[in-house]
Amino acid sequence: MELNEVYFYTSTILNWQKLLVLDKYKDIIISSLKYLVEKEKIEVYAFVIMPNHIHLIWKMLAMNGKEMPHASFMKYTAHQFLNDLTIHHPKVLPYFESSSGEREYQFWERNSLPIHLYTDSVLQQKLQYIHFNPVAKKWNLAEDFVSYKYSSAKFYEEGIDDFGFLKHYCDI
């Protein structure tokens, strides 16, 4: 990913495991996004947190030390997942053991998918996809897409930013 470009970004939990079912893990993601926005490393235009993956429309603004903000985001959230699982759910940890010699545990798949959003129509299509994902038949996480808590849909439909870090895509 390049700085100052808008991307649709998907990242999946290792082996599509449903780690993000518990709100405390979704809150780790929200906290990390909020921190990076406050530090002016990213802008977040849209997101949804699903049981085993996330979708974001975001822009990397500046390096976070020596690494890109998305790398910091992935690393920080993984460390927080590990800390919580070690204390509260140690029997779950073996499901995240890494087969590579680089680390003991891995929470995110390595093949995150960034798609450069070069036109307004592609951006709007991805925005709609993100917001309607929780009500898709496969997931059925909410009756109404606006009522799904871990999404930016309410921001776009009602103008309410419950997270305090969203920026409207028209402000790009």
Image: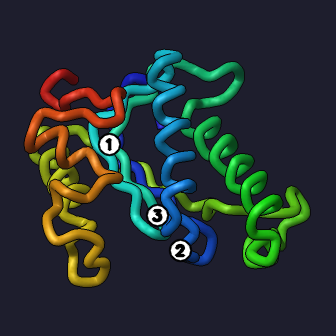
Looking at the image, residue 35 lies above or below residue 28: above
Could you tell me residue 75's position as x and y percent?
Answer: 68, 44
The colour scheme used here is: rainbow
Q: Residues within 10 Å of mark 3 (few under 14, many from 20)?
A: many
Left or right of 33: which side holds 147?
left
Which residue is situated farthest in the bottom direction here? 138
Q: Earlier in the sequence, mark 1 or mark 2?
A: 2
Could you tell me residue 68's position as x and y percent?
Answer: 59, 30
How far apart marks 3 and 2 lie (CA) works out to 8 Å
Observer-side mark, 3 or 1, equals 3
* Mark 1 secondary-structure assignment: strand
Q: Residues within 10 Å of mark 2 (few under 14, many from 20)?
A: some
Left or right of 56: which side holds 81?
right
Whether residue 39 is visible to the viewer of this picture, yes or no, is: yes
- Quadrant (top left/top right/bottom left/bottom right) for the C terminus: top left
Reading the image, the residue beneath label 1 is 57
Looking at the image, residue 159 lies above or below residue 24: above
Observer-side mark, 3 or 2, equals 2
Please state which amino acid type lies under the numbered disc 2. Answer: Lys
Reading the image, the residue beneath label 3 is 53
Please state which amino acid type lies under the numbered disc 1. Answer: Ile
Residue at 47 percent across and 16 percent down: it is 40
Reading the image, the residue beneath label 2 is 18
How far apart marks 1 and 2 lie (CA) works out to 22 Å
